[in-house]
Amino acid sequence: MSRLQVVSGKGGTGKTTVAAALALALATEGKRTLLVEVEGRQGIAQLFETDALPYEERKIAVAPGGGEVYALAIDAERALLDYLQMFYKMGSAGRALKKLGAIDFATTIAPGVRDVLLTGKACEAVRRKDRGGRFVYDYVVMDAPPTGRITRFLNVNDEVAGLAKIGPIHNQAQAVMRVLKSPETAVHLVTLLEEMPVQETADGIAELRAARLPVGRIIVNMVRPRVLEEADLELVETVPRSSLARSLSSAGLGGARRGGHAERLVDPLLAQAEEYAERFALETEQRAVLADLGLPLHELPLFAEGMDLAGLYQLARNLRGQGVS
């Protein structure tokens, strides 16, 4: 299993939820996982029902078996100060630059600098070791930008390494790309069983492969439960209305006389069945499209009442049950 797990997906597919569940799944059996956020939305804090994350690694959950999940909201300005101190020993000078607004300028205006800092901080966590020479984190899970810009986000260090031919910036960018383009990294795409998210997933995978970035798994989120089997769906258009009314009546749902309550239920039930049949056909078609992409495919259920902390742990169990560990 790759040590850096990058999770992307079209907006609205629940990629932050999947990233959090993946971090929990990987932390079981005594492992330690760092879950990093790079978009400044504090979505991780909301999912784990905790205070807004500061720019520090904070333990936010304990996984089954005693594992631990830490979280970090990476701030580009603070990451740049770390960078200046690490490579140029500019601790106090860097803080002075921040007061003058130069740090904000660099991370907001300079092309690519922000993404370089965000990916660099995550990769530093992947490579970090303790005094005994062991990795501090077994896994780092990144809640990354959406599919439409994930390739450029991850590949920006390649561009920077090409622009800065020598020096610490060049060396840092190359070190980051060695992690991102190695088996240490896997980029997972989250989607729904709908045409637009599936198409964006296919396009994103093609872009990642063209950039030689390692694609991991496809995770289909918010899958609705199967109510009827295909054989039952075939009966929807052929079942006689009178037979359906009698069946409803025998089940205690209204009287058997003409115009009774049971007959009034027939049209709404058939309409619901037809709607379900259409959705079933669409989802079957989209599953086939995803299967043709040649990647491991996993599915997570829809929580009709909304996601909470208990639901997050359930998703983690589902992922482990599907071999994601």
Image (spheres, rainbow, N blue to C red):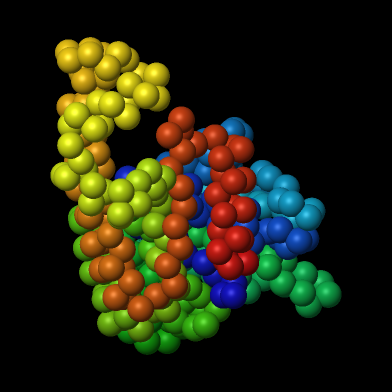
Horizontally, residue 156 falls left or right of residue 233, namely right
Mark count:
0
Horizontally, residue 209 falls left or right of residue 315, namely left
Residue 82 seen anywhere in this rendered image of the structure: no
Residue 147, image x and y in percent? 31, 61
Depth order, front residue of 11/261: 261
Quadrant assignment for the C terminus: bottom right
Residue displayed at 63% across by 74% down: 127
Residue displayed at 42% across by 79% down: 214
Residue 1, image x and y in percent? 59, 75
Q: Residue furthest right?
A: 132
Residue displayed at 28% across by 59% down: 284
Residue 37, image x and y in percent? 49, 52
Residue displayed at 77% across by 74% down: 134
> Measured along the vertical axis of the image, is residue 216 above or below residue 193?
below
> Measured along the vertical axis of the image, is residue 215 above or below residue 82?
below
Residue 210, image x and y in percent? 28, 82
Q: Quadrant of residue 159?
A: bottom left
> Measured along the vertical axis of the image, is residue 297 above or below residue 175?
above
Horizontally, residue 255 falls left or right of residue 17, namely left
Residue 267 seen anywhere in this rendered image of the structure: yes
Q: Quadrant of residue 257?
A: top left
Depth order, front residue of 250/306: 250
